[in-house]
Image (tube, grey):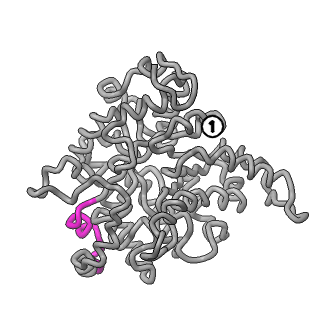
Amino acid sequence: MIISSDCHAGATQAEYRDYLEASYRARYDSAMSDPDVIERRSVEVIGMRIPSSDANGESAPLTAQWNVERRLAQLDTDGVAAEVIFPQPAGRAAPPFYNIFGHPLDPRDPDAAAAGCRAYNRWLADFCANSPDPARHAGLALVGVVDDIDTTVAEIEWAKRAGLRGVILRSQPLSGYGWHEPRYEPIWSVCEDLAMPIHTHGGEGPELGNLPGSSSIFFTEVVWFAHRLFWFLLWSGALERHPRLRLVLTEQFADWIPDMLRRLDAQYEGTVSNITLTEGLTMKPSEYWARQCSVGASFMSRLECERRHEIGIENILWGSDFPHDEGTWPNTSDSLHNTFDGVPENELRAMLGENALDVYGFDREALMPHVGRVGPLVESFTSVSRSAPGSPRG
């Protein structure tokens, strides 16, 4: 069973307009006709294969980001039984008034950004529910602006009722000190109570301007920022107070986790300048990681696979990053073999599907017919042995 824990979808401009509250529609029309705004939304270096449309506006195969029938066909050809859906990070299909990269397009108007996130969430809920096979999709609600805590909690409650399976937060709030502020406690409580995992996704960073080295600096730092929510929830005690709260760190690599956990455990067990840094925790940081955290290990490398026991077999969720260039689509089969050949069956099944099945509450019985149709044979992986990372397949 292959479940991709990292896929992306977004609506057309017309669809987003219909889902926006009426008071924002004229402004959205104006923004989407402004070349400067389009340029800021369309960061070419992010590597999206998806065109807005072909010459006929419909037949491009990767309009699958908003055409669910075509999307299901792409999942089939990639051997994927089910998917977890994040928003498109930029371009015309990104949520209105909101750019996942950097900051919202107009950070002076968080109300517009929040309205854009709501429009995306409502579109995504309908996209999943109206699919010919809704059991194959787990959509995540984008909660990009959280200044009004009561409204944020209400949006998470709505998302659960609407069938969405988790929450996406920025790696750092747009205002305030950070996620360790006690004012965010109701968010952690409602996500724990409703079994809505919290996610960050690689791609954020501070505005760097059009200066020498800006793109290289951005891509050097881009995954580091997404890691931060873990140690904010850790040291603030949120993971201690909410033992059923789940955190998923997606598309930010996985090889850094063992070294980070060793460093945090050492910090927990020692002092800095005679200051004890346990912050009232009852377990080591690595134990909170094992109990409550997952890494959405998109397009996982063989080197990361070799570190899987240090990361935690049960904490790894594989992802294809469909439909982005850096992901495995449309060569997922080759990528999976390059990474996982020779891995024991129980570990293979866990990382490629079983863990995601549990985290997101997929219906196993509903997925099994698709597994039987499109899933690869376990024997094609386990019959191969490798002597070292990166060695040729046997």
Q: Nearer the viewer, residue 316 or 390?
A: 390
Q: Nearer the viewer, residue 163 or 250?
A: 250
Residue 30, percent from left and from top: 24, 80
Q: Residue at the location (30% across, 58% down)?
A: 10
The answer to whether 145 is drawn above or below residue 162 in the figure is below
Residue 141, percent from left and from top: 42, 58
Q: Residue at the location (31% across, 35% down)?
A: 78
Is 320 situated left or right of 223 in this image? left
Q: Which residue is mark 1?
A: 312
Q: Nearer the viewer, residue 42 or 357?
A: 42
The answer to whether 140 is drawn above or below residue 1 in the figure is below
Q: Main secondary structure of the magenta part?
A: helix
Residue 263, percent from left and from top: 74, 51
- Crowd around label 1: few <14 · some 14–19 · many ≥20 (10 Å): some
Q: Quadrant of residue 51?
A: bottom left
Q: Residue at the location (70% across, 47% down)?
A: 261
The answer to whether 128 is drawn above or below residue 46 in the figure is above
